[in-house]
Image: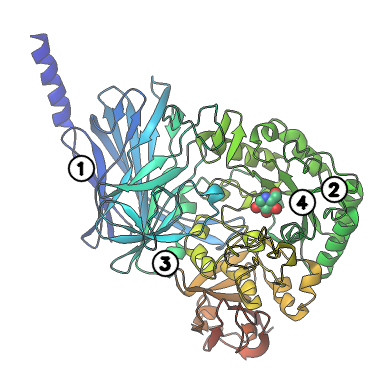
Amino acid sequence: MKKILFIGLVSILFFSCQSSTEVSSPDGTLILRFVQTEDGGIGYRVSRDNNEIIAFSPLGFLTENQSLGNGFCMVGTKKKNYTSVWETVWGEERFIEDRHNELLVSLRHESGIRMDVVFRVFDDGFAFRYVFPEQDRRELTVTDELTAYRFTQTAEAWSIPWRTEYYEGLWQKRVINHSQISNVNSQISNDTLCSPITIEFADGTYGFVHEAALTDYPAQNLYVREGALRTYLTPWLREPIKNEELKIKNEVKAYVELPFESPWRFVVLTRTLPELVASCIMLNLNEPCKIEDPSWIKPTKFMGIWWGMHIKTMTWEQGPKHGATTANMERYMRFAKEHGIGAVLAEGWNKGWEDWKHFDFTTPYDDWDMDYLSRLSDSLGVQIVGHNETGGNAADYEADLDSIYRYHAAHGIHVIKTGYVAPIIRTADGLQWNKGQSGVRHYRKVIETAAKYHIAIDNHEPVMPTGLQRTYPNLMTQEGVRGQEWNAWSADGGSPCEHVTVLPYTRILAGPVDYTPGVFHFENPGNALDPTGTKGSADRGITPRVHSTLMNQLGLFVCFYSPLQMACDLPEHYMEHPDAFRFIEHVPCDWEQSILVDGKIGDFCVFARQERGTENWYIGGITDEETREVTIPLSFLNHQSPMNNHQYKATLYRDAEDADWETRPYAYNIEEREVTADDTIRVRMAPGGGFAMELKINQ
Ligand code: NOJ
């Protein structure tokens, strides 16, 4: 009798559950429908203009002792329309519009757990996050996240494998078909990918899949199984770990304390590439700025005692070729002052580089006079960018953060480049992936502590950015890219020309990048192939070098966004081409607005950006190994004030007719002319080439 009553009650509960509800984008074109299956499973579908883009895709979790993938009842919904415009502290855009419709679905699981899914639909994509409200249950151990994206059409995804060390890989196009991810060019066995991925759909539209506001949860990775793109959360590791043998003893992914909000999962869906690049969904999903007065956070260009170590003319450790000496730093700082560069980085100023194990972040080498350089920095108005390489020992670094940052701030240092060179870092929880939950917590602690001391961070070997710079604008830039340094020493000879034409559409959509553009001298004897084949690319007989023309290096300053933008080469190399260096002196790194004028993933890009607070514009273009002529209508110059057809003085830095990255990388011309918004510019980019253009308003 008791049993019969119980079943009756349960079925009434399920019967009273709604099974679907929907929300559309503000312009009505995108519709997201939340759907429940018969067993209380949860999922969603998305359509655009009545065509299904994403078929039913599951949501939910697996936890240590139960599945939160089914057994749910929808107990309520709430809808909200939202429009606002907010101003960035720095960025590619000064003002960002956040316009979306929100649907909150409240669910009760048969175990009693309450969970909400919050959906937001924008005109250019959608997002959702899981929210566990305050309830009796205090914690959950997540073993898997069931989130999936079942795209209805075949797509090609630009991506890197999930275990790419430090994300420093060459992005490749992999077909997402209905059963697996496969590499277009060659078969790879490791078919799980890092987030983000950029998608080219068969119908010519675009997608970008990533996460936002990652603060206390493992980074997501993505793989395809049974026709859907699925989530693989970076797992916790269990010691002991011997060499490369990783012990993932039990697949715990996240320890979640309730109440809890997961990072957002989002998909940008656009018809064109410029719209994809312009999407602000990721920033809009992050919390507003938590730093009460961020006025101390200033974008700046910087140079550094850095490239010398990578081309082996200097060393980090003390010795005859020590780079970070007082005299050398003074030389760099005076050069920076003369050329209007705001700051100078010094790597190898502190003790510990001999074994990379015992870095001391408050004790300089004997040939570095911190007090003197700090006074010099004050008097010249050129900042010192500090450097804290941890060698992957995040635990020790974290334990001393306050004293380290107090020391730097006391010496007037308000920007620090951090580093974690170790594929698996040591956190307060032992050896862990840097993009696991423990690593994510560490990086957040660094940013929050640095903010207390008015210190901005340039984070190398980071977890992939997720837009946290909106909340903590002192997180100014990050690496997480196969950057310029690979062109100094990589055994494969350096990155192919194509590499830089992929990044603006992939890695850089996740946030500012410290790629370090600006190499002006391509000979690289320090890493030259020697007769024993122990340096350089022995198999191909190639000395590593930058695969670009000098003009391509200038174009990068506009195409690659970073509010801390490094001009990476040596002062003496810049003085080999002072007329071209003028562009680096002038180009800003903080923008009023940015436009992708033209481009194709893996082929080329042309960006135009308006300097923040002025009417001046900068245009940059880069191409792969193909020569390319681009046509740029300057109509964007007056699109904000069409009545004001200003005259601009345009200075164009372009590849010479015979320029070629391999044979004549230094061949360029600099031309001046007067232009207005009615003009169109045609520029030819050489193989591996590019261009840069400054448009200054005639007063
Ligand atoms: C790797 C970083 O990417 C590079 O910029 C730095 O010079 C070295 N680590 C040393 O910290």
Residue designated by label 4: 347
The one nearer the camera, 297 or 534, is 534
Q: Earlier in the sequence, mark 2 or mark 1?
A: 1
Compared across the picture, whether 414 is left or right of 693 comes to right
* 2 vs 1, front mark: 2
- Amino acid carrying label 3: it is Glu
Disc 1 is placed on an element classified as strand
Q: Earlier in the sequence, mark 4 or mark 2?
A: 2
* 3 vs 4, front mark: 4
- Amino acid carrying label 1: it is Ser
How far apart in space, not on screen, are marks 4 and 1 (Cα)?
57 Å
CB atoms of marks 4 and 1 within 8 Å: no
How far apart in space, not on screen, are marks 3 and 1 (Cα)?
31 Å
How far apart in space, not on screen, are marks 3 and 4 (Cα)?
39 Å
How far apart in space, not on screen, are marks 4 and 2 (Cα)?
11 Å
Identify the coloring: rainbow
CB atoms of marks 3 and 2 within 8 Å: no
User: Relative to 411, does residue 376 appear above or below in the rendering?
Assistant: below
Q: Which mark is residue 152?
A: none
Q: Residues within 10 Å of mark 4 (few under 14, many from 20)?
A: many
Q: Residue at x 87, y 62 (%)?
A: 331
Residue designated by label 3: 275
Q: Earlier in the sequence, mark 4 or mark 1?
A: 1
